Image (cartoon, helix red, strand yellow):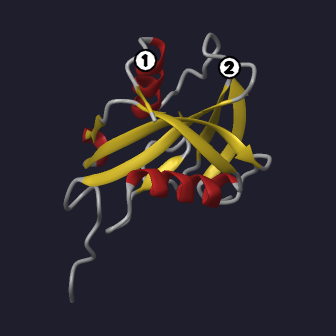
Amino acid sequence: MEKEFKIGKDCIGVGCGALIFNKKNEVLLMKRSKNAKNQAGWWSQPGGAVDFNEKAVVATKREIKEELGIEIDIWAQVPHIDHVLKKENQHWMAIPFLAKIKKGVPKIMELEKCDEIGWFSLKKLPRKLSQTTRETIGSYLKKRYIKL
């Protein structure tokens, strides 16, 4: 019987995501459910895995449409993040972006992966914030991003 190959465990996975801002400069975060690939119970920016032959910008827009039912405008890219989860034996390279909503109202589309969503001020963020989200916010605040 062949072993199932798992991205992020058997090889480095490539992830993507976007820190989505509203007009109040709040960010949209998702609370990961117990069924998420990793970091269950933690808040994170929306995103997911980049598929083979898919550009990171396209993957980010696709993932956010699948997760939240919205279309986004990506306006900047922040430095990549080496996301090593030693306890979960996973390694991901995350490519994060900064975005705003182009069309739609965010709602949970994948109930099995997300427990709740919410808008948060950068001064009042949840305690259990994923590494990728923390680092994306840090890059944004330090103006370490490339406008697209």
- Residue 42 visible to the viewer: no
Q: In the image, what residue occupies the spot 42% across and 47% down?
A: 16
Q: Nearer the viewer, mark 2 or mark 1?
A: 2
- Residue 142 visible to the viewer: yes
Look at label 1 and name its amino acid: Gly
The residue wearing badge 2 is 25
Residue 89 x/y as whole percent: 25, 48
Look at label 2 and name its amino acid: Asn
* Left or right: where 63 falls relative to 23: left
Residue 19 x/y as whole percent: 55, 33
Q: Residue lying furthest front in this view?
A: 148
Q: In the image, what residue occupies the spot 37% across and 50% down?
A: 15
Q: Quadrant of residue 112?
A: bottom right
Front in this rendered view, residue 123 or 75:
75
Q: Residue lying furthest bottom in this view?
A: 1
The residue wearing badge 1 is 138
Q: Is residue 74 above or below residue 54?
A: above
- C-alpha distance separating marks 2 and 1: 15 Å
Q: In the image, what residue occupies the spot 62% across and 61% down?
A: 66
Q: Is residue 74 above or below residue 127?
A: below
Q: In the image, what residue occupies the spot 58% across and 49% down?
A: 33
Helix or strand or loop: what does disc 2 sit on?
loop
How crowded is the residue under tag 1: few (<14 C-alpha within 10 Å), some, or many (20+)?
A: few
Whether residues under marks 2 and 1 lie with C-beta atoms below 8 angstroms apart, the answer is no
Helix or strand or loop: what does disc 1 sit on?
helix
* Left or right: where 108 falls relative to 143: right
Which of the two discs, 2 and 1, labels the residue nearer the N terminus? Answer: 2
* Left or right: where 83 falls relative to 37: left
Q: Quadrant of the N terminus?
A: bottom left
